[in-house]
Image: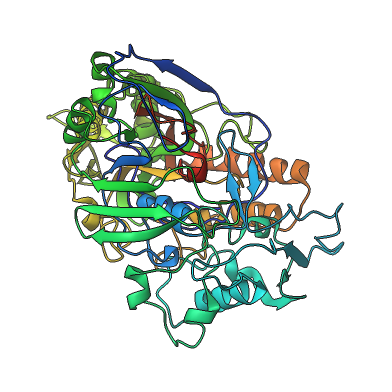
């Protein structure tokens, strides 16, 4: 599954791929929609023939605000959420995820399963039937050769991919014809069903890239040939990415003629541009600004519970945090419901595990309770004595820690300030040490470089609950996303067992057993599942936020 720590001005930017997406969600995502008052100013027609009710609307052109541009347009080289959005426009994955988190066949015709014969009885061969009418934007057909090339590019060692997790479970990829390709697995691996799908690495054009030793840092990155609904028209670095409709898209030309993705890092500036109608969409309004949306005429607002979660991580290599009693006390000292309500405007659902509450695999386990009295008892029993300044000491060592998040993020700073007070009340000295997102999440930064105590960040998940790359003993950086440096052989065994069966009931049991241990040992505290607020020009139709990966999943249907 995709497990991606991220910079979170709204709900993320830098993200690390450590999971691959698999089986569909069993239950729909709660979705609330409400509209602000709209003032009718003008009536014209859009390119699709629908009435346009506002004079500020540019028919056929959607103007979107994003916090940052991707560092690469080849998804295997980017950790950013903006890369998932751009990838959804330029490339066709095997499957996309709709507004209810259900898989939508895209380059693949149907979901492999044992019942339809596309998964072998021993679970070692997973076959995909590719859409015969899909072509690259230069007119060359998309074939099984492209899937094979992409897997080799990921695994060759010649390219600095953000992760090879999941793809390393493949022994070989073979063509059973131009539009039929089979993954030959080293062992049964349930998440393999969604390799090469949305949120992971979609197939790339072998006819253009197949002769290159490495595809990193090549001109193709600035002028990609894709097979998605849009093509890149112009990239003004630091300012705009402009996309035009792809007339060769297999579904037919999109309803929009153009998408203008404006890079607007500041959330307040985004809101001001929405208010002045210079943009048509903010996909994730900063929580402190949500209340101001009611004052903006001519917009529609949606709230969507999404598969991204905030969590408090502990670096278990730090001497103080190796002590499970300290971690248990910290988790009980923090008032999670208060933080959700007062800092994040109630736009979150308290979490207990890293499996979305709407997933078929979600364990029925309660969150760690807020109980400062229990926190004090735990520390007392562990030998931590309150000193003259109110901070606990043990063996001459002061119980002093730091917490890190991203700079220039008012909600996060407010949450950290609350935690400072809450931990001080039980005898723990907490200081704040924040970093720019590019520093915090850098390969050699505090998280991956083992130079932090506690972190306050958001991760994004896909539909499959596979989380071994987050908690597994073999996935310490630089080999994975286990930035807690947590290792428990029993948890490892349970999570590996869950990977090796296609039986959802058996997998759910494994995840519940693993999470009972994780909730007791507290390598991290899962805080809340995020409710994302989007605000769009009321003339912007068919924008359907997805709980998984990207809200750009159906961009070919957008119209304005």
Task: Give the left or right position of residue 550, taking residue 432 as reference.
Answer: right
- Whether residue 84 is visible to the viewer of this picture, yes or no, is yes
461 versus 244 height, above or below: above
| Quadrant (top left/top right/bottom left/bottom right) for the C terminus | top left
Instruction: Where is residue 55? Give x, y as percent.
Output: 26, 25
Q: Nearer the viewer, residue 485 or 208?
A: 208
Q: Nearer the viewer, residue 343 or 401?
A: 343
Residue displayed at 46% across by 58% down: 17
Task: Give the left or right position of residue 342, taking residue 35 as reference.
Answer: left
Residue displayed at 53% across by 80% down: 207
Q: Nearer the viewer, residue 329 or 492?
A: 492
544 versus 254 height, above or below: above
153 versus 286 height, above or below: below
The quarter holding residue 152 reads bottom right
- Whether residue 15 is visible to the viewer of this picture, yes or no, is no
Residue displayed at 33% across by 11% down: 37
């Amino acid at each position: 599954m995709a497990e991606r720590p991220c910079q979170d001005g709204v709900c993320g930017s830098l993200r690390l791929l450590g999971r691959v997406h698999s089986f569909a969600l069993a239950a729909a995502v709660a979705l609330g929609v409400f509209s602000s008052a709209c003032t009718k100013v003008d009536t014209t027609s859009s390119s699709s023939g629908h009435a346009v009710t506002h004079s500020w609307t540019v028919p056929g052109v959607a103007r979107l605000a994003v916090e940052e541009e991707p560092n690469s347009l080849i998804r295997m080289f980017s950790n950013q959420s903006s890369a998932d959005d751009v990838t959804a426009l330029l490339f066709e994955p095997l499957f996309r995820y709709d507004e209810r988190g259900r898989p939508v066949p895209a380059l693949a015709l149907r979901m492999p399963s044992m019942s339809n014969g596309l998964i072998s009885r021993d679970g070692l061969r997973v076959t995909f039937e590719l859409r015969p009418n899909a072509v690259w934007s230069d007119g060359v057909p998309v074939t099984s050769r492209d899937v094979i090339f992409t897997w080799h590019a990921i695994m060759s060692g010649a390219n600095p991919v953000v992760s090879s997790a999941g793809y390393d479970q493949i022994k070989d990829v073979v063509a059973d014809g131009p539009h039929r390709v089979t993954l030959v697995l080293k062992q049964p691996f349930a998440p393999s069903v969604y390799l090469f799908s949305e949120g992971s690495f979609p197939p790339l054009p072998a006819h253009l890239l197949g002769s290159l030793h490495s595809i990193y840092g090549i001109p193709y990155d600035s002028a990609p040939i894709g097979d998605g609904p849009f093509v890149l028209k112009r990239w003004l670095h630091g300012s705009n990415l402009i996309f035009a409709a792809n007339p060769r898209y297999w579904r037919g030309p999109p309803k929009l003629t153009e998408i203008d993705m404006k890079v607007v890092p500041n959330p307040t500036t985004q809101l001001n541009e929405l208010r002045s109608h210079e943009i048509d969409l903010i996909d994730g309004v900063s929580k402190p600004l949500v209340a101001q949306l009611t004052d903006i005429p001519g917009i529609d607002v949606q709230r969507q519970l999404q598969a991204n979660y905030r969590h408090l991580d502990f670096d278990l290599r730090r001497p103080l945090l190796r002590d499970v009693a300290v971690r248990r006390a910290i988790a009980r000292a923090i008032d999670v419901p208060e933080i959700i309500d007062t800092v994040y405007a109630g736009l979150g659902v308290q979490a207990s595990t890293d499996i979305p509450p709407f997933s078929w695999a979600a364990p029925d386990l309660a969150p760690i309770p807020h109980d400062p009295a229990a926190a004090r008892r735990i520390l007392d029993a562990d030998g931590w004595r309150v000193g003259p300044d109110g901070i606990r000491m043990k063996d001459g060592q002061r119980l002093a820690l730091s917490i890190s998040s991203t700079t220039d993020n008012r909600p996060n700073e407010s949450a950290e300030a609350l935690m400072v007070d809450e931990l001080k009340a039980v005898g723990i000295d907490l200081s704040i040490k924040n970093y720019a997102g590019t520093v915090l999440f850098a390969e050699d930064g505090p998280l991956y470089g083992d130079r932090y105590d506690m972190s306050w960040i958001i991760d994004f998940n896909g539909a499959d609950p596979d989380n071994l790359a987050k908690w597994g003993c073999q996935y310490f950086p630089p080999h994975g996303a286990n930035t807690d440096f947590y290792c428990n052989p029993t948890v490892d065994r349970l999570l590996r067992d869950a990977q090796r069966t296609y039986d959802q009931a058996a997998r759910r049991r494994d995840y519940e057993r693993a999470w009972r241990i994780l909730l007791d040992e507290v390598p991290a505290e899962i805080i809340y599942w995020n409710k994302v607020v989007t605000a769009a020009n009321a003339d912007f139709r068919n924008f359907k936020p997805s709980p998984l990966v990207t809200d750009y999943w159906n961009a070919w249907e957008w119209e304005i």
